[in-house]
Image (cartoon, rainbow, N blue to C red):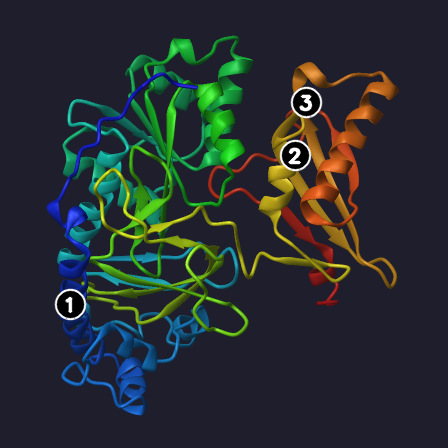
Amino acid sequence: MSDFVVENRIWNRAEVLPRKALRALQLRRLRRQLEQAARVPFYRERMAKAKLTPQSLKSLDDLRRLPFTVKDDLRRNYPLGLCAVPRAELARIHGSSGTTGSSTFVGYTRKDLATWAELCARFLTSGGLRPEHTVQIAFGYGLFTGGFGLHYGVERVGAALIPAAAGNTARQIRLLRDLEVDVLVCTPSYALVIAEGLAEAGTGPHALHLRYGHLGAEPWTEDMRVKIEQQLGILAFNNYGLSEVIGPGVSGECPLRNGMHIQEDHFIVECVNPETLEPVAEGEVGELVFTSLTKEACPVLRYRTRDLASLNSEPCPCGRTGVRMSRVTGRTDDMLIIRGVNVFPLQVEEALLGVAGTAPHYMIIVDRPGNLDEATVQVEIQPGSFSDEMRAMQALRERIDRALQANTGIRFHVELVRPQSLERHLGKAVHVRDLRRDKGLL
């Protein structure tokens, strides 16, 4: 793990507003956001049915009178039916990755882009970024919001930027080394691919100038953070965002790295039971729901993210007053039901990372050849742990089997595969193949 220390720097005084002042600001901004949303026929109709107007909004609790917005609402209004400004006022159009269905599009005005840059600058600064640093962005540039959002944030801070984009790991390592990069921005899974590339080249983190990593765009475990920090010699920071809300910048970690501070001057967050849709108690895992407060082009009201996490409103020693969200523990649409048991891919990852000798690369394959579900986990073995001795591999397989049962409650068939044999992904990692869906059994 890195020995670097992050000074607690606040980018903007809005991050440390007293809670009472923050709530008052949210209420003022919510009234203006409702005015903006009323320009969209979809939201205007919903507000009319709920008999809610900007003038009748007396408290933040009144927001709950509105129904939730879901991904299918965006799809039904494809491509830009939820846009609140004329097309001539749009400065940028981004889209979701479409990993759980068809893509959806989100527009940005110039003011929206400035807000986006501000939000990313906040969590980058809290995670160690300084104007004198050099940053390498190894995210894809395109419809995906990750690359551009972090790009804007880095420029807002004033640091030098290398828009390396995704892919060509050998070139990524060469840039990191030759340009003495301080900060790496990419997905957690790609950070591990870069670490593998270093090891294959016969070198290690000592050859790099890296200090920090800002990693996001996919759920990852604390164990994976430890591996990344060990293999790259950095401090790794988590951040959260999604295209439908704005992109990266919704929340990010402070130097204490005990939850991600939500930028509550720009977003209202709720945490609900995904089945009953009722609020959950603080600290309890539920589905995150966001309402934007300052978006011009595409405001969102009570958007169900499908992301599962918990909230913590206790004061943080760093001084930031925004409520903290935990790591995303999974997505409601990523949940696998195997023989009646709910299983999330992150549970499998957590179990595997706790077994010495396994690499953080795996594939879950679920099938139903007869009447019962069958689940297989293909697990890569670390180069130094792979053996031709059957007894050693069987012992490792049994350790993995016990860990998986303890973490998920079900029995998987464990397949040990050679190092580097599973596909590497430049963007969001893919860890599940559900053959039941392909067969029309779900």
Q: Identify the residue position indicated by label 3 in the image.
A: 357
| SS assignment at label 2 | helix
| Residue 250 appears in view | no
Image height check: is 238 above or below 241? above
Question: Image point 26% across, 60% down: which residue?
Answer: 267
- Give the number of callouts: 3
Comes first in the chain, label 3 or label 2:
2
Q: Is residue 377 left or right of residue 389?
A: left
Question: Image point 32% across, 85% down: which residue?
Answer: 46
| Residue 295 appears in view | yes
Q: Position of residue 434 (x, y in %)?
A: 69, 55
Residue at mark 3 to residue at mark 2: CA–CA distance: 9 Å
Q: Mark 1: which amino acid?
A: Arg
Q: Position of residue 406 (x, y in %)?
A: 71, 42
Q: Identify the residue position indicated by label 2 in the image.
A: 352
Comes first in the chain, label 2 or label 1:
1
Residue at mark 2 to residue at mark 1: CA–CA distance: 45 Å
Which sits in the foreground, 255 or 118? 255
The disc at residue 29 is: 1
Check whether the beta carbons of the residues at disc 2 and disc 1 lie within 8 A of each other: no
Q: Position of residue 184 (x, y in %)?
A: 34, 28
Q: Quadrant of the C terminus?
A: bottom right
Image height check: is 35 above or below 282? below
Q: Mark 3: which amino acid?
A: Gly
Q: Mark 2: which amino acid?
A: Leu
Check whether the beta carbons of the residues at disc 3 and disc 2 lie within 8 A of each other: no
Check whether the beta carbons of the residues at disc 1 and disc 3 lie within 8 A of each other: no
